[in-house]
C-alpha cells in the first residue's frame, strides 16, 4: 500500500445522525467525497412524515450524491458502491451492517470513527455507558473495520476528559469535533496510519449495549452519585423517569445535593427549593429537579409543574428496582 501523506483520497462516507456531520464537513475540504450513504428516511414529527436523517440533509446541502439503501447486502447495492471506486469508506454512526464484500471493497478498507477508547465500550451506546459508569476519560478511536462488532485494529485515538457535569449531549458534541480532528489526521496519511494499527486487547473489551426504557427508571434507593450519573448519561435522550401520582415524569434537569435530611424516606418529596426545584430524597442525599417533562407534555420548570399538582411534602414517588448500568 503506497501513497503520499498529502494525497487526496476518494472517499465514500457512511453515517446517519448529526454526530457524523463534523467529520464529513472536514473531509469534504481535504478529500474527494464521491458519495454519502445514510439510513433511509424515517417518519418524524406530528404528521409522522418521512424525513431525511440529519447527515443526508447536510450532504444534500453540500451537493453530494446521497444513497440510503435499507441494506448493503444485495449485489445491486454493492455494484453501485463499487462503481464509486473509493480509496476508503469512512463510517461514523451509520447504523447498518457492512457485509464482508463491502469491507473488502475499498483500496484502504473501511475506517470507523468510534466514540470510545477501544476496546472499552464497544457497541451502540459508548458515550452513555462511559458517563453512567463514572469514567473520567474517554475519546475517539479510528479503527479498520472487521466483521466483528468494533473489533478491528485501532489506527489512532484522541482522548478527552469527562467533566463532572457532562451530559451525554455535551460529551456527544465534543466527541463529534474530536472525531473530525482524528479522521482528518488518519485519512491524510492513511497508508502510514494502517501500518501503525494496533490489535485490540480482547481481555479488556467491554460492551456498551443499547439503552432500554426500564434502565432509565430512577431507583431512589441507589446512591445519589449513581443517580446523578444516570441522569446525565441519558440526557437529553432517552431521558430518565420516575412515577408520579398521575403518570410517568421525565427528568429534564437536576443536580445532586448531599445534605440528607434526617429520617427522610428514599423517594419522598421534601418540598420546593429556593429556586423552585423539586427536592426528592434518595438513600444518601437529595436530588434537586429543576425541569421535568410530564407524560404527553413538553418540558417545563419544576415549579410550574408542581403548581398544577397536588403533591404534598412526604409523598413517596414509587420506588423502582435497581436497573442502573453496571
Image (cartoon, rainbow, N blue to C red):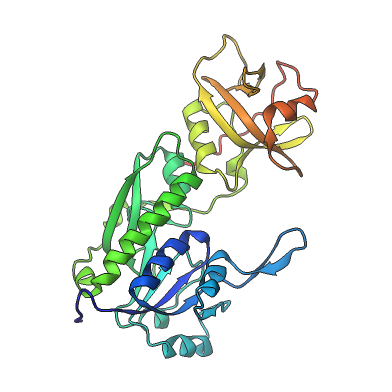
Q: Is residue 170 visible?
A: yes
Residue 223 visible in the snapshot: no
As rendered, which of 5 and 83 lies closer to the eye?
5
In the picture, which quadrant includes the C terminus?
Answer: top left
Does residue 96 appear to the left or right of 200 in the view shown? right
Choose top left, top right, bottom left or bottom right for residue 113.
Answer: bottom left
Quarter containing the N terminus: bottom left
Question: Residue 43 at what x, y percent from top left?
Answer: 69, 66
What residue is rendered at 34% in x and 51% in y?
139
Q: Quadrant of residue 317?
A: top right
Task: From this view, report whether residue 301 is shown above or below residue 3.
Answer: above
Q: Residue furthest top?
A: 262
Examine the rendered structure and indicate whether residue 278 appears above or below residue 69: above
Classify 96 as above or below 201: below
Q: Position of residue 277 (x, y in %)?
A: 63, 24
Find residue 48 and report its image quarter: bottom right
**102 left or right of 301?**
left
Residue visible at 45% across and 51% down in the picture: 173
Residue drawn 42% across and 56% down?
Answer: 176
Viewer-proximal residue, 151 or 70?
70
The mark tally for this picture is 0
The percent coordinates of residue 282 (x first, y second) are: 57, 23
Residue 211 coordinates in the image, percent (x, y): 55, 50
The reply, left or right, for residue 242 in relation to residue 35 is right
Amino acid at each position: 500500500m503506497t501513497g503520499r501523506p498529502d494525497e487526496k483520497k476518494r472517499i465514500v462516507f457512511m453515517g446517519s445522525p448529526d454526530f457524523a456531520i463534523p467529520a464529513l464537513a472536514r473531509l469534504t475540504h481535504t478529500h474527494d467525497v464521491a458519495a454519502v450513504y445514510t439510513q433511509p428516511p424515517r417518519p418524524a414529527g406530528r404528521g409522522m412524515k418521512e424525513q431525511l436523517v440529519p447527515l443526508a440533509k447536510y450532504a444534500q446541502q453540500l451537493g453530494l450524491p446521497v444513497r440510503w439503501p435499507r441494506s448493503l447486502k444485495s449485489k445491486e447495492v454493492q455494484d453501485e458502491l463499487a462503481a464509486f471506486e473509493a480509496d476508503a469508506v469512512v463510517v461514523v454512526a451509520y447504523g447498518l451492517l457492512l457485509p464482508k464484500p463491502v469491507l473488502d471493497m475499498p483500496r484502504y478498507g473501511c475506517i470507523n470513527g468510534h466514540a470510545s477508547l477501544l476496546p472499552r465500550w464497544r457497541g451502540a451506546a459508548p458515550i452513555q455507558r462511559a458517563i453512567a459508569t463514572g469514567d473520567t476519560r474517554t475519546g475517539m478511536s479510528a479503527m479498520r473495520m472487521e466483521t466483528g462488532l468494533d473489533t478491528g485494529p485501532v489506527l489512532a485515538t484522541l482522548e478527552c476528559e469527562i467533566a463532572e457535569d457532562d451530559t451525554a449531549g455535551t460529551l456527544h458534541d465534543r466527541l463529534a469535533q474530536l472525531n473530525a480532528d482524528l479522521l482528518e489526521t488518519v485519512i491524510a496519511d492513511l497508508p502510514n496510519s494502517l501500518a501503525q494499527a494496533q490489535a485490540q486487547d480482547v481481555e479488556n473489551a467491554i460492551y456498551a449495549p443499547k439503552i432500554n426504557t426500564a434502565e432509565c427508571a430512577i431507583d431512589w434507593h441507589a446512591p445519589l452519585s449513581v443517580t446523578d450519573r444516570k441522569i446525565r448519561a441519558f440526557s437529553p435522550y432517552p431521558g430518565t423517569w420516575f412515577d408520579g401520582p398521575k403518570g410517568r415524569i421525565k427528568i429534564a434537569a437536576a443536580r445532586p445535593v448531599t445534605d440528607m435530611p434526617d429520617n427522610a424516606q428514599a423517594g419522598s418529596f421534601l418540598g420546593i427549593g429556593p429556586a423552585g426545584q423539586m427536592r426528592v430524597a434518595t438513600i444518601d442525599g437529595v436530588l434537586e429537579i429543576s425541569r421535568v417533562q410530564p407524560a404527553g407534555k413538553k418540558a417545563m420548570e419544576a415549579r410550574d409543574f408542581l403548581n398544577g399538582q397536588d403533591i404534598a411534602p412526604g409523598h413517596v414517588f414509587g420506588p423502582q428496582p435497581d436497573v442502573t448500568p453496571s
